[in-house]
């Protein structure tokens, strides 16, 4: 079995871009996503000696979720955010190459309007395809709490979507884009 350095290199080569996308979905900032992945890997490797690449990746993903949630607890920036869609983002894209970028920005803005636990629950459910039990395990809470977090998050996203559609009725995104953006090319 390769040493720790070899396992880290393997993980970065095989799953580095996937881990960064995952971190980006959780935090909404490209530079912060890089920092989160690095911090998660340092934390995992300083406490555990993984037996295989799959185990290491699972622990890194779990630590990523926890880092984002903890960051939200320590700061009040989530409380100070203006509703991203209603306040500032005007979807003025046409059906063109720019549409994909607009969809990505719109999804990022929608996700950033959620508190950290709700955001993590939505990302785990709709981008990682985890069942409620898997989300509860990843977040360290009960299944009822996960259902409540998802319900509240989806209600808030629907309200923001209606507000955005009201401002620009012909360009509101479909619920499928929120639920499955990778199938629509919105996140890659």
Image (cartoon, grey):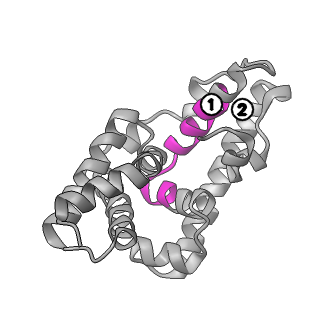
Image quarter where the C terminus lies is top right
Does residue 115 show up magenta in the picture?
A: yes
Based on the picture, tell me whether residue 152 belongs to the magenta stretch: no
Seen as rendered, the residue at the extreme left is 46
Q: Is residue 145 above or below residue 113?
A: below
Name the residue nearer the viewer: 29 or 16: 16
On the image, the x and y values in percent for residue 1 come to 24, 73
Give the residue at x 49% y 41%: 112
- Give the magenta range: 102-120
* Residue at (77% x, 49% y) in the render: 176
Measured from the top left, where is residue 30 in percent x and y?
A: 40, 34
Say which element carries label 1.
helix
Q: Nearer the viewer, residue 130 or 91?
A: 130
Kindly report the distance in space between the C-alpha atoms of the residues bearing marks 2 and 1.
Answer: 6 Å
Q: Which residue is mark 2?
A: 164
User: Is residue 160 left or right of 5 when viewed as pictured?
Assistant: right
**Whole-percent x, y for residue 177 in the image:** 73, 44
**Direction front: furthest residue:** 1
Q: Are marks 2 and 1 in contact (CB under 8 Å)?
A: yes
Q: Examine the rendered structure and indicate whether residue 101 appears above or below residue 161.
A: above
Q: Which residue is mark 1?
A: 86
Q: Is residue 116 left or right of residue 85?
A: left
Image position of 184 with respect to 67: above or below:
above
Where is 73 relative to 172, above or below? below
């Amino acid at each position: 079995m390769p040493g720790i350095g070899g396992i880290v290199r393997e993980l970065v080569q095989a799953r580095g871009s996937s881990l960064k996308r995952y971190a980006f979905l959780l935090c909404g900032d490209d530079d912060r996503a890089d920092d989160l992945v690095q911090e998660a890997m340092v934390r995992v490797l300083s406490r555990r000696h993984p037996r295989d690449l799959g185990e290491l990746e699972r622990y890194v993903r779990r630590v990523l979720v926890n880092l984002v949630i903890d960051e939200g607890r320590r700061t009040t920036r989530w409380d100070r955010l203006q509703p991203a869609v209603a306040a500032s983002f005007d979807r003025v894209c046409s059906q063109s190459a720019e549409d994909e970028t607009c969809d990505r920005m719109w999804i990022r803005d929608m996700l950033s309007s959620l508190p950290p636990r709700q955001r993590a629950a939505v990302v785990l459910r709709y981008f990682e395809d985890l069942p409620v039990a898997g989300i509860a395990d990843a977040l360290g809470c009960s299944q009822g709490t996960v259902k409540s977090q998802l319900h509240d998050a989806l209600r808030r996203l629907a309200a923001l979507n209606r507000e955005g559609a009201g401002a620009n009725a012909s360009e509101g995104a479909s619920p499928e884009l929120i639920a499955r953006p990778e199938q629509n090319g919105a996140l890659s």
